[in-house]
Image: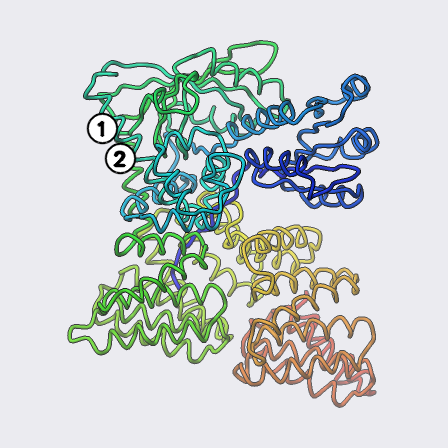
Amino acid sequence: MKGDNSRLIAVHKMPSVVTIWLHDSVDHNNKDFQYTISQLERIVSHVNTFTDNDECVEFILNSSQNKVYIILSDLVGRYLVPCIHDMPQVDSIFIFCENQRRHKTWTTISTKIKGVFIDIKSLYEAVKNIFNRYEQNAMPMSFLASERRLDQLNPSFMYTQLFKEVLLTINFGDEHIKQFIHDYPTALAINSKQSSDVDQLVNDYLANEPIWWYTRGTILHSMLNRALRVIDGEILVRMGFFITDLHRHIEQLHREQIINTSFSNIFTVYRGQGLSREDFEELSKTKGGLMSFNYFLSTSTKRDFAYHYADSNAYNPDLVGILFNIQVDPTQTSTPFAFIENVSNFSVEAEVLFTMPSVFRIHEIKPLCTDHPIYEVNILLTSDVDKELSTLTHYIRQENYLDGDGWSRLGQLLIKLSQNQKAEEIYNVLLSQTSNDNDKWLIYYQLATVQDHQGAYLKAIELCQRAVEICEKSFSPNPSHLATSYNNIGGVYEHMGEYQKALEYYEKALSVELKSLPTNHPDMATSYNNIGLVYHYMGDYPKAVLYLQSTISIWEHSLPANHPVLATSYTNIGSVYTQTGEYPKALRYFQSALSIQQQSLPVNHPDLATSFSNIGLIYKNMGDYPEALIYFEKALLIHEQAFPANHPHLATFYNNIGSVYSRTGEYQKALEHYEKALSIDQQSLPASHPHLATSYSNISLVYHHMSDYQEALKYYEKALSIRQQSLPANHPDLAALYHNIGGVYSNIRDHSKALEYYRKALSIWKQSLPANHPHLATSYINIGVVYKNMGDYTKALEYCHKFFSIRQ
């Protein structure tokens, strides 16, 4: 809702693994084949099988954001490897055949071919080793240099910490284990045969210790680490019972080992892995600062064992081999860790396991080898009195304050991550279990936020009204709750395009706050911002600037200089300057917003898409179409990943891209994007929503350029009908429509109609735009041309002079 700084966590730089098996013939009912697949799916979550080469290649091409492992039979391998070898997403190729010697020569031509295998056991071990190395390298970590501001913190660490803290406040039971088994039946299977007996699987889980399950290296391990890597709220909630069990098991062993004096002195453990060159550069810049491992960190007391992992990665040209030399002082930290040799599934590793996240200070980085890149990185587990870590932890909790406890806090965290479906599920359960009005108010508020984020506006208003009713009937109403509820209702009406109703509720919120808060309170800034935005949408730009400047004034006094909320304020006022044609000023505000967001938000956050789109719009208006298209396509890519295919925001980005193609004369491409936008708008918005008018108007403009004037008029009239219902009579968007309709009539030589619409446009623009705005110049020259075509040269000359007075 308004003022909410929800964040969508970015997918980590390491992609997901997709496993493919291409064979000349596959019999899915064959027991040997089923056994082979079941063995492989103990390592990877799913094996995609193909018998058609073209279908397989198309699947690989569509997996460009993933890391592809492909198993080929001997008959197709020799033909297909040259076709797929250079695809960057193809990481590892395995040849499965009956005669190893026959294929030895041609399979040595590529480092991507990992071997020729004649039995499932050797193939399984090879895939397992490659996948384990990938998993080892893909673990999420964050860096915070000493001089870096806390509001530049990598969100991955922040949300890992918050998830753990919230999950530990929830009492998980057998029903949660059963639900997990129902959703992921193979994850807790001890052998390769999937059990259908849920109670038996629950008993199997409870009969073995959590660390044993984690160190088995099966799907459970991979699922958890991938969920932590991408902060997948759905999976992390489903695995909440296991995360808490694993943390508490480490905690229990830690207490026992401290008492038994297993460790009382400083000791060293090691971890070997590969880092991307980009991550290694970030690590190098962080020397002296903090780094966190945002997962359950596995280390070994055996240096040689860890060095092997570092060395094996150093031969990959995309990676740097890293040997972490980790110093631990058990007397100075409360971070739980434990020697797990007696409970691990692999006792030979002499493993020490740390809970998540674990934070270390980087002391020294030095090369170990000259012929290939291996570095030793000396790090120290942070102590309980580390001031920088204490400040960091305080900042995270302050910036992500969560009301309530347990499941309610978890729901709020999911909303911050834009993982709305799971949040809605949680809040509906909580609503059915409470009779307390304060709890109900919070639940209705959060459910309304979810519905608003999903575009279900009428449902959101209904839930907001229920929250208002709770406030209004209370004997001692909470002013903050009441103002928040009014702001939320206003926000939904704003999203629906009903700006007068939105303004009514925003002003109600401001009225409550003026009576109960100091004038510079941050909540006041939220209300000023909301009112300023509505005036912007209604075309009253002076009032919009007035309220938005009040917002910025409060935020700049109360927030760090690069706080995400300031980015939002800069975006809002930049949008007003865009409308008034002050493009350099608008561009400065949009670039300031983008700079803040790139420091504090993940790479696929929707706010970044908004900034890319805004900057693209400025470049388009300034005539730099290639640059505009680059920014619009960046925005579209983020929103396609973050929202459903029919979300209204996607329509905006299709419209933007279409507008560039329209300007460059690529009308067919423009029409294709505009029609996509219209289709989304028709599915997701009321028939009278202003966004539909935008789509109709854009399509009209293309038909206009293509000289199909009848189609152009048809769509312009649809757009005009909506605009006249939803906007004030002097709104600039109406002026743009009148101007375009005038252009069509001018083209079909209906001069009187053309003049009528051009004059309507000019009348509005003269009221709402500066006297030297380019739109006014365009109006003057077009009216002049009409008078010339009508033979009234005196009038024509008069308007041409007005045109030149602006252009000079």
User: What's the residue type where badge 1 is placed?
Assistant: Val
The residue sitting at the bottom extreme is: 752
In the depicted view, which residue is nearer to us: 204 or 524?
A: 204
Mark 1 vs 2: CB contact within 8 A: yes
Q: What is the three-letter code of the residue carrying label 2?
A: Ser
The image's mark for residue 1 is none
Q: Name the residue under label 2.
A: 390
Q: Quadrant of the C terminus?
A: bottom right
Looking at the image, residue 44 sits to the left or right of residue 699; the answer is: left
Rendered view: 621 above or below 482:
above
Is 595 in front, or is 541? 595
Q: Is mark 1 on a helix, strand or loop?
A: loop
Q: In which quarter of the image is residue 708?
A: bottom right
Percent across and percent down for residue 162 are: 34, 44
Residue 360 appears at what percent x and percent y?
Answer: 35, 26
160 or 719, which is in the foreground? 160
Q: Nearer the viewer, residue 261 or 409?
A: 261
Q: Along the horizontal axis of the image, is 583 left or right of 56?
A: left
Query: Residue 745: horizontal and vertical position, in percent?
Result: 77, 84
Among numbered discs 1 and 2, the one appearing first in the sequence: 1
Quarter of the image for residue 30 reads top right
- The residue depicted at 83 percent of the width and 87 percent of the height is 791
Q: Return the x and y of residue 502 as percentages of the image width and height.
A: 42, 76
Q: Residues within 10 Å of mark 1 (few under 14, many from 20)?
A: few
State the residue at coordinates (57%, 29%). 131
> For residue 385, which numbered disc appears in the image?
1
Q: Quadrant of the N terminus?
A: bottom left
